[in-house]
């Protein structure tokens, strides 16, 4: 069973930066494709970014492209989400997700087998 634990959330002013981390255990990390999703109050959980097993292929939702960067360290079993130029609209609970090997329908929650508990990101004006 894969366990995912997010960290790094918090309160930041608009224009600021945060880096989220997601530590994985229970399976060889280099066999997991990873994703980040977020859920704002009263809204559905939405795709943010995804990365393939070796880190060479990444995907982003349009609203964060150019501001957020997903990366991974397979030696450290961790995936990161560097978030720059944060906006109040980025306020949400951010979730780390994983699936074995291949990113398929990477924007869909149902494509991922494992989820973390989430970390709150709040961006103030």
Image (spheres, helix red, strand yellow):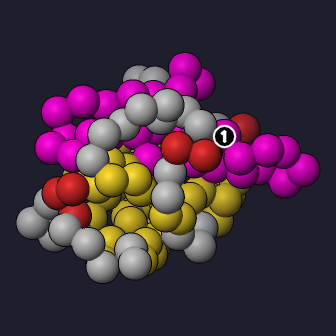
63 falls in the magenta region = yes
Q: Quadrant of residue 1?
A: bottom left
Residue 13 in view of the camera = no
Measuring from the top left, give residue 103's x and y in whole percent.
36, 37
Which sits in the foreground, 88 or 20?
A: 20
Which sits in the foreground, 114 or 58?
A: 114
* Drawn side of residue 122 relative to residue 94, left or right: right
Looking at the image, which residue is at 37% across and 64% down? 21
The residue segment tinted magenta is 35-64
Measuring from the top left, give residue 76's x and y in whole percent.
16, 70
37 falls in the magenta region = yes
Q: Residues within 10 Å of mark 1 (few under 14, many from 20)?
A: some
The residue that label 1 is drawn on is 46
Q: Quadrant of residue 80?
A: bottom left
In the image, is residue 54 above or below residue 67?
below
At mark 1, the secondary structure is strand
In the image, is residue 63 above or below residue 82?
above
């Amino acid at each position: 069973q894969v366990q995912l634990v997010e960290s790094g959330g918090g309160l930041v002013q608009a224009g600021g930066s945060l880096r989220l981390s997601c530590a994985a255990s229970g399976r060889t990390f280099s066999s997991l494709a990873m994703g980040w999703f977020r859920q704002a109050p009263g809204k559905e959980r939405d795709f943010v970014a995804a990365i393939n097993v070796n880190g060479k292929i990444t995907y982003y939702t349009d609203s964060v492209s150019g501001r957020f960067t997903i990366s991974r360290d397979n030696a450290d079993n961790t995936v990161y989400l560097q978030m720059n130029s944060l906006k109040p609209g980025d306020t949400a609970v951010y979730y780390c997700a994983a699936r074995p090997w291949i990113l398929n329908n990477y924007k869909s929650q149902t494509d991922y087998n494992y989820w973390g508990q989430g970390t709150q990101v709040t961006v103030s004006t």
